[in-house]
Amino acid sequence: MTEYLLILVSAVFVNNIVMVKILGLCPFMGVSKKLEAAIGMGAATTFVLTLASGSSYLINHYLLGPELSYLTTLSFIVVIAGIVQFTEMVVQKTSPMLYQVLGIYLPLITTNCAVLGIPLLNVQAKHNFMESIFFGMGGALGFTLVMVLFAGMRERMEGADVPAIFKGSAIAMVTAGLMSLSFMGFSGLIK
Amino acid sequence: MRTLYHFHGGIHPPSNKTQSTQTAIARAPLPSLLIVPLQQHAGETAKPVVQAGDHVLKGQLIGMPDGFVSSAVHAPTSGTIAAVDMQLIAHPSGLPNLCATLIPDGKDEWVALKPVDDYRSHSPAELQQLLRMGGVVGLGGAAFPSDIKVRIGKQKITTLILNGAECEPYITCDDMLMCERAAEIVQGAEILRFMLDANEVLIGVEDNKPEAIAALQQAITASGPVLQQNKRYEVVAIPTIYPGGSAKQLIRVLTGLEVPSGKLPTDIGVQCFNVATAYSVHRALVKGEPLISRIVTITGNVREAQNFEALIGTPIAELVALAEALPDTDAYIMGGPMMGFPLPAVHVPLVKATNCIIAASKKIFPPPPPAMPCIRCTRCVEVCPADLQPQDLYWFAQSKEFGRAQAFSLFDCIECGACSYVCPSHIPLVQYYRFAKSEIRAREHDKQLADQARVRHEYHEQRLEREKREKAEKLAAKEKAAQAAKLASAQPLTPQQQTEQAELAASRAHIRQLAQSEVEHTDEGVTK
Amino acid sequence: MLSALLVMAAIAIVLGAVLGFAAIKFRVEGNPLVDQIDAILPQTQCGQCGFPGCKPYATAIADGEADINKCPPGGEDGIHKLADLLGMEFKPLGGDAVSKPKSVAIIDESTCIGCTLCIQACPVDAIVGAAKQMHTIIAAECTGCELCVAPCPVDCISMQVIEEKISNWKWKYPVYSLNAVEAIQIAATGTAR
């Protein structure tokens, strides 16, 4: 039980997928302008990542085995693409507003390097099924946490008197860098 | 001892009230000219019922109320109407508005007054109409027509509160009124209580006005037979704090009840009137005199700060001259130093909402230091009486994010100025909130117009479609009728027509025969 | 080799089945976006965006055919709202679109000949009149789109800017000096505090 908790804490804080591993920056920058969009994107990514980690472990362990290990990347991408497509349909049906707000970033979860990265990291760390699920869920929760924090900060900065040369993406990048510094302070939390 | 409650925040600015309470209320002499604006109240402008050249008597109707939220305007003295046109008025914009200019004839003749003998024998609706036609509006500053405030809705009114707090520095008109005319105030309160059918009357007075409290208590004791025996009257001394005289805050202090955001005091069974309004109600109903004068404090950079009973429409310049403004006066503020605004010019007229005029100078009101960026010290949050977050409201107002400003309850702000008073960066916070509020109101108005225009446009499109359809149908019907007519016109021929046709056919045949034989003869001739 | 193909094929078939099932179960009809965009547009029906009215422009934006910065009556505020709704970047008012102050049309009654050409042009039916009768504009309904000015054969329609009165006056955006010297100067010249 403690290992799962440790995996969760590690995935959310110590090895935060965006701030420490620097993966998944595309939706992080693109959707964090509005808080509601950020929360929606985080929820969608959590759903996708948890499913993807679980199914990719199953495929890797049972279908591919050691002989077909060269098909890992290809099959993971196919599975992720399918799950994202499914998620897109669900979101369009349940919340057309969120679908509109997320726009192109919803299908772009497929190309989110974090969503491919976490299953690959699971393979590398030789996690079992439960550990994979927790790592995937934790990674996505960390992604959501950081998205929400960043979106809150960006909304605040909307009203600030930012110098013209820094307006928009530039100040966002600077802020993300400072956030990353602060998250790296978590290192050493788990031995 | 009555339990008193507290409201959040509040400040204690220096009161500066003793300057103007040294002498009794003086009656201002008749001015040389009176400019009576036709809108001195919240709601629609009154419609002028006089024109240039008319002679009017004191208290004669010159402006008819127009619309549900409106009040009447009367001539403050007898004289001749010189003009009904746009004149400069006391408004922060400096824009003019419709006014009736009156030249007094010096006789000060009243119009035939119609006092009410016993208000208890009249229905509340009749009394409301008398208040509306008597021009009685709230004299606490908002100038809301009082006839609307005495309407009872579904909620039973348990408590009538009279606001004698007068929390803003420099202003002392209500204090002097309570000291000198407490009996009329109490009688006016009883009329209001009767109209609202309230169970009790609480008169809230700040504890820095002991003489006023004593005068009111004496008046209540003395008017025993007039007041209903089973209804409770109490003068409550409340702690001196700004803005304790704001209606919502006063209700909180006296009853512990909080008026919900967006709702009115009547929704929780309370109604609040200024003591001067109660006094005007008494004058309007018992004496039959419409609202044509009020007490105004002239203070600040003047030699003799005092209170005057002045006619509505008196140019402020004349009142200020009476109080002898000092030469280094550079501006005049209508209202108090917290919520008042500078007058665009000193000759603007006194209106029903003018409670105080402060002559300002560099000594009394030094120029404000430059505004510096907000450091988020939250001193403003500590003093806000409406439990708001002024620093966030400022942030959204200055970046024009009006949606978020509204989400932070911008419209619950009472614009008391406590936040700007304590701001260490000297940011004029209330100016930002006023800007945001008026901008939001303008945008909502635009949106309403846009929605109306959309509906009209859609109807326009439908109308064109309908006309096209109707035209097509008419054309189709016409064609059908024409076809039917053509078929109907193929009838059998009459006998005469038949013989004619037969003769024609016979002659045609004969001609054909002749032509044929001619050809044969010729042919024979040719072939011979 | 064969096992690899079989595995990939199996994954593809399973996913395809799941997606096919989902496509039927989660079908979505219509496009509510057009109404949302139309609710933001100012309904002036002036045609300055290049489309014959606000609804066609909204449809074009929803289809991605038109840019969001083509509406002068909506102003910068309208473009901001559209950008927020669609998750796009804000763009300043484009092309030769110029922001004009709000105005209302007025007919010079001494010149009007009663031809009804302006009545046919008005998209919100704000002109009252009939053939050979006096035409007049209902100021409260006029959106200032200026579509009636051109058809008038005697040029009797002009646009009057809505002037600022007490009833429509707004507090201005506070402008205060951050510089001590400037602040004292402002105070010294006697402008209202």
Image: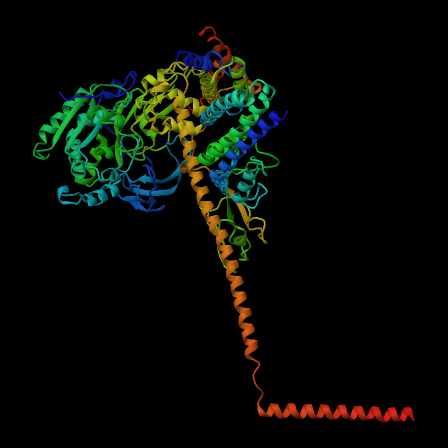
Residue at position x 64%, y 90% in the image: B501
Where is residue B239 shown, x and y percent of the image? 22, 19
Q: Is residue A111 left or right of residue B514?
A: left
Q: Is residue B386 above or below residue B518?
A: above
Viewer-proximal residue among A52 and B511:
A52
Residue C85, x across and y down, in percent: 49, 33
Instruction: Indicate left or right for B472 with B338 as reference.
Output: right
* Vertical comparison of C74 with B175: above or below: below
Q: Depth check: C27 or B517 in front?
A: C27
Tell me where residue B317 sits by quadrant.
top left
Residue C27 in view, yes or no: no
Name of the residue lying farthest toward the right? B528
Task: Tell me which colouring the rendered structure shows.
Answer: rainbow
- The correct choice, above or below, for B409 with respect to C152 in the image is above
Percent position of residue B365, x then y:
37, 17
The answer to whether B224 appears left or right of B125 in the picture is left
Q: Position of residue B82 (x, y in %)?
A: 36, 42
Q: Quadrant of the C terminus of chain B?
A: bottom right
Quadrant where the N terminus of chain B sits is top left
